[in-house]
Image (cartoon, rainbow, N blue to C red):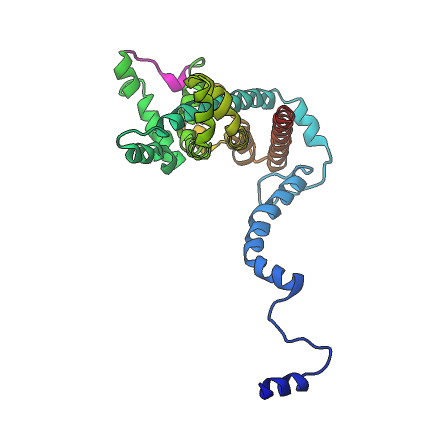
Amino acid sequence: MSATRSLAAARPAGRRPSRGFSGGGGTLALLLPALVPVLVLSVGPLVYGILLAFTDARSGRNSVTSFTGLANVADLLGDSDFWGSFRVGLVWGVSVTVLQFLASLGLALLLDQNLRFRGLARVLALVPWAMPPVVTGLMWRLVYHPDAGLLNALLGTDVDWLNDFSLALPAVIVVGVWTGMPQTTVVLLAGLQGVPKELHEAVSVDGAGTWRRFWNVTLPQLRPVIVAITSLDFVWNINQFSLVYVLTQGGPGGRTRLPMLFAYEEAFRYGFFGYAATLGVAVTLVVLAVLGLYLWRQAREAA
């Protein structure tokens, strides 16, 4: 005890013992290993892409890049190919998101029941999520194959699903729904398990049937989960690239050419990097606007 007091007396007045990292500097030092990859791999390319959208950057070793202002924006507004791909993207994004949610909600309600082999069924429901998009695209190309495809064999037809002008987009939408169902199902299933059973018991005492319990209890309790997962699904779907590229490469005749596919072609097929960056910025702004309107309406209804 006396030794402790002597050490305290020997310590200079006004100084506190060092505890390693302290204050904001220590917190920043701990966050740096996580912040550096985000800044280098996400924020940096994002800022560079926005700056590139105001230039005439092209491919080629000897190409000269110059600032063009809003020239790319003017070209974009008058580009019928862009508006065509944008319409396809909206149809794709909204259709896949809505159908994906409805199918996932039904599957989540089924998996929430006390069924035999429920654990196995939940594992099998995650199989599409575990498959890489390229593998999924190749598998569904075999399913849709006009001569040796499983779908034509079952239906007894010889339809070329992915090359038909009227059937290509619906066929690709089906694949998008199948691919995106697992993560939506998992989120909705977690939400269902968080609904208090006391609420169902209370409305059951009042004589409410299955549909009324679902509409008046389950659905309102799931509203925050539904808003979150549908918002994320829409962003993921509208930015889809690899799956549709493997299936159709945007064909036939641009019927499945999503905005990201169009930007890819402009950048890596034709070498117009500046214009492709403008396409990416435009799609991002439109997605943010649509998503903001959707979230605003949901928040207004909830209030």
Along the viewing direction, whichever of 228 and 201 lies nearer the viewer: 201
Left or right of 118 on screen, residue 28: right
Q: Quadrant of residue 134?
A: top left
197 sits left or right of 83 in the view: left
- Which quarter of the figure has residue 242? top left
Give the residues drawn in magenta, as a range. Answer: 157-164
What is the x, y in percent for residue 74? 70, 27
Compared across the picture, whether 3 is left or right of 98 comes to right
Query: Where residue 214 appears, x then y in whole percent?
Result: 46, 21
Which quadrant does the C terminus fall into? Answer: top right
Residue occupying image coordinates x 68% and y 38%: 55
Identify which residue, 234 or 169, lies in the foreground.
Answer: 234
Outermost residue to the front: 205
Measuring from the top left, give residue 148's x and y in whole percent.
26, 20
Viewer-proximal residue among 243 and 9:
9
Answer whether residue 257 is visible to the viewer in this image: no
Relative image position of residue 247 (x, y in whole percent) = 40, 27
